[in-house]
Amino acid sequence: MIKTVTVLGANGTMGSNVSGIFASFGGVKVYLVSRTIEKSKKAMANIASSVKADSVKKNLIPADYSMLEDCIRESDLIFESVAEDLDTKIKINNEISSWVDEDTIICTGSSGLSIKVLAEVFPENIRKNYLGVHFFNPPYNLTLCEIIPSEYTEKKLLNNMKDYVGSKLHRTVVQVTDSPAFLGNRIGFQFINETLQYAEKYKHKGGIDYIDSILGPFTGRSMPPLVTSNFVGLDVHQAIVDNLYDNTNDYAKESFIMPNFAVYLVNKGILGKKTNGGLYKTIVSNDGTKKYLVYDISLNEYREVKNYNLSFTNKMVDSLRVGDYNSAFNTLINDSSLEAKLCLEFLLKYVVYSLITSKYVGDSIHAADDVMAAGFGWCPPLGMVQALFGIENFVTLAEERLPEAIWNEVEIEQLFSDISSSKYDYRRFFQAKH
């Protein structure tokens, strides 16, 4: 039974949010370990806000690294949530290994680094207790948790953790293989980074907000893809896609190359929402009014976000507003504008890449649905197939509309030969707004 948890990196965004999940849903005592006590105390206020319960503070104990040994020796579970950098995590695992015993569960919140490599920092008799437990941000709203065993992880521990995270912490649990970026981020950031590439490709049409206007909430996502990147942080985005480019070799490999303008922004420390400047930024005037700006790739400066007033998006939103989903998707399929063609191509590619990746990273074909619905708030791929009028019609569209390079690599009919319907109602993901 888990009664006490130590979270390392508890003052970070994910560290504090995950601490809140353990303290509130798990009802356990949580040691918040940061570089200073002051940072841990500050994290307490953020944690109470993240889980919308001030009462959770009674389960939180601020600490710093000078207290780490005592925290670990008292804890049943150690959750490492330090920077997403292999050397940093190896260094912290070396510290942890000095004080854990054979009964201590050790988890990393890594979003895609090798669990095997991280486990091998520990003595052989401890490696069996090590696994990845990847929450999605913000975890109060996005319930996905990927569980990633290494080849050393004990089967009983794996099953117990899946049960604990699912039943006690109320997560949507998906077991995935120890592969680059795991499943959710591999699918999601393939899509997001390719939209970033297209923003550069179409920079003279508007770039960032132009692409987001084509792939807005009416296409089955809680926020447009490049708004999502800005929310996550361009530095985190880059770490994920660099890892995928270096360690994968499928037909989508080139889509993981970070475009030059985005690398420039990262190098300048212009990272997104957390620095109030990235792909987008918000300016608040003295009277409280807000101005929303976007980075213009062509001009290398910020300008006001445009209203592109695209015909196909207006028609789709009007149809969705009255619940006429068939008309909305018929509009998308039959509109001959460049923007509608780009939109449909992205949605088709999303489904195909999701299902291919799920076959060898997830534990079932439905894993892709779970990670995208519960981890990103996107219409899951099998739901998207239903939205586009079923398997037969989807296959026809894919073969007609996808680039030759994809369907030369992928047997699309075979890919869809053994899939079943989504357990998710696709209609709830499509929002009647731009």
Image (cartoon, grey):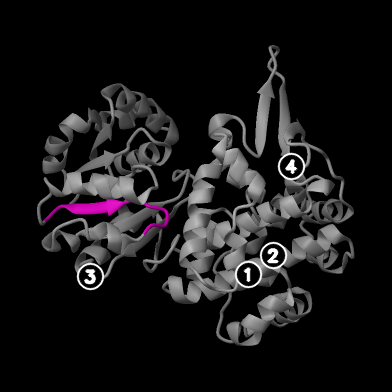
Distance from disc 3 to disc 4, alpha carbons, whole Å, reads 50 Å
The residue lying furthest to the top in this view is 286
Prevailing secondary structure of the magenta residues? loop
Q: Secondary structure at mark 4?
A: loop
Q: Is residue 7 left or right of residue 324?
A: left
Magenta region? 103-113
User: Which sits in the foreground, 336 or 386?
Assistant: 336
Q: Residue 351 got which mark?
A: 1
Query: Is residue 163 in sight in this rendering?
Result: no
Mark 2, Cα crowd under 10 Å, few <14 / some 14-19 / many 20+, is: some
Q: Amino acid at mark 3?
A: Lys
Residue at position x 86%, y 55% in the image: 315
Q: Nearer the viewer, mark 4 or mark 1?
A: 4
Q: Residue 347 got which mark?
A: 2
Q: Where does the image place residue 231, in percent across and percent down from the top left?
A: 57, 41
Decide: marks 2, 3 in contact (CB < 8 A)?
A: no
Distance from disc 2 to disc 1, alpha carbons, whole Å, reads 6 Å
Q: Residue 297 got which mark?
A: 4
Q: Where does the image place residue 215, in percent across and percent down from the top left?
A: 72, 54
Distance from disc 3 to disc 1, alpha carbons, whole Å, reads 32 Å
Say if 350 sits above or below 306 in the image: below
Say if 371 sits above or below 204 in the image: below
